[in-house]
Amino acid sequence: MMADGTDLAALQCRLREEHVNGAFGALVSGLVWFVVGLALLRADLKTAFAVLFFGGMLIFPLAAVAGRIAGAPKGDDVPNPLEVSAFEGTAVLFAGLFVAYLLIGAAQWLVLPVVGLAIGVRYLTFNSLYGEPAYWLLGLALVAVSIAAALRVIGSPPYPFLIGGIEVVSGALLFARWRAIH
């Protein structure tokens, strides 16, 4: 129960239902990271960062469309406070993007790992939103890979593909868990 008497498990269930367990958000984000990797290989870091920034803006709308196609129910008119919490969590992403942008001229090897770290930290909050412990594993995986890239254990070209791969596999598993119930 939440402080106002609302059943947290019921709110989490609604969020899982309406957003397909968050699966398509992870899938679309992973695909954006693949395009970032291609941009890094074919162009430069500034182009890759622009792809990440603008592609990131498409994640929620594309995930919502994919969810409707997959059969997710449309949300009802009753507001879900967890959706507000999810929106508030985007502040972590904006902070990561801002810091990464500042690093473009000073420490280029840190630009993408800073964004990946912010995304990983944000995923760590998704267990509270969705009631899905798999998000802890996803978040920790992104944090670990991002730290390795920041420490230059993982190089720039493979880094975005690793992040993309982790997210796509996680999104597919989250979708499979959602589909098994529906």
Image (cartoon, grey):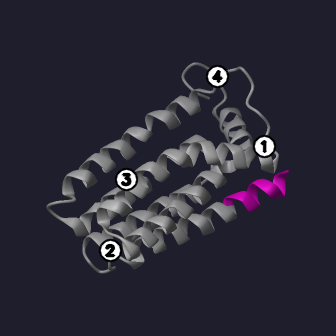
Residue type for callout 3: Ala
| Label 2 – label 1 distance at C-alpha | 36 Å
How would you rate the neighbour count of disc 2 (Cα within 10 Å): few for under 14, some for 14-19, many for 20 or more?
A: some
Of helix, strand and loop, which mostly describes the magenta segment?
helix
Q: Is residue 140 magenta?
A: no
**Residue tagged 1:** 72
Disc nearer the start of the sequence (1/4):
1
Q: Where residue 105 sits: x, y (%)?
A: 16, 60
Image quarter of the N terminus = top right
User: Circles 2 and 3: CB distance less than 8 Å?
Assistant: no
**Residue tagged 3:** 118
Disc nearer the start of the sequence (2/3):
3
Residue type for callout 1: Ala
Say which element carries label 3: helix
User: Circles 2 and 4: CB distance less than 8 Å?
Assistant: no
129 horizontally vs 91: left or right: right
Is residue 29 shown to the viewer in this render?
yes
Question: In the picture, residue 159 is in which quadrant?
Answer: bottom left
Is residue 117 shown to the viewer in this render?
no
Residue type for callout 2: Ala
**Residue tagged 4:** 79
> Range of the magenta residues?
174-182
Disc nearer the start of the sequence (2/4):
4
Q: Where residue 57 sits: x, y (%)?
A: 49, 45
**Residue tagged 2:** 148
Question: In the picture, residue 170 is in which quadrant?
Answer: bottom right
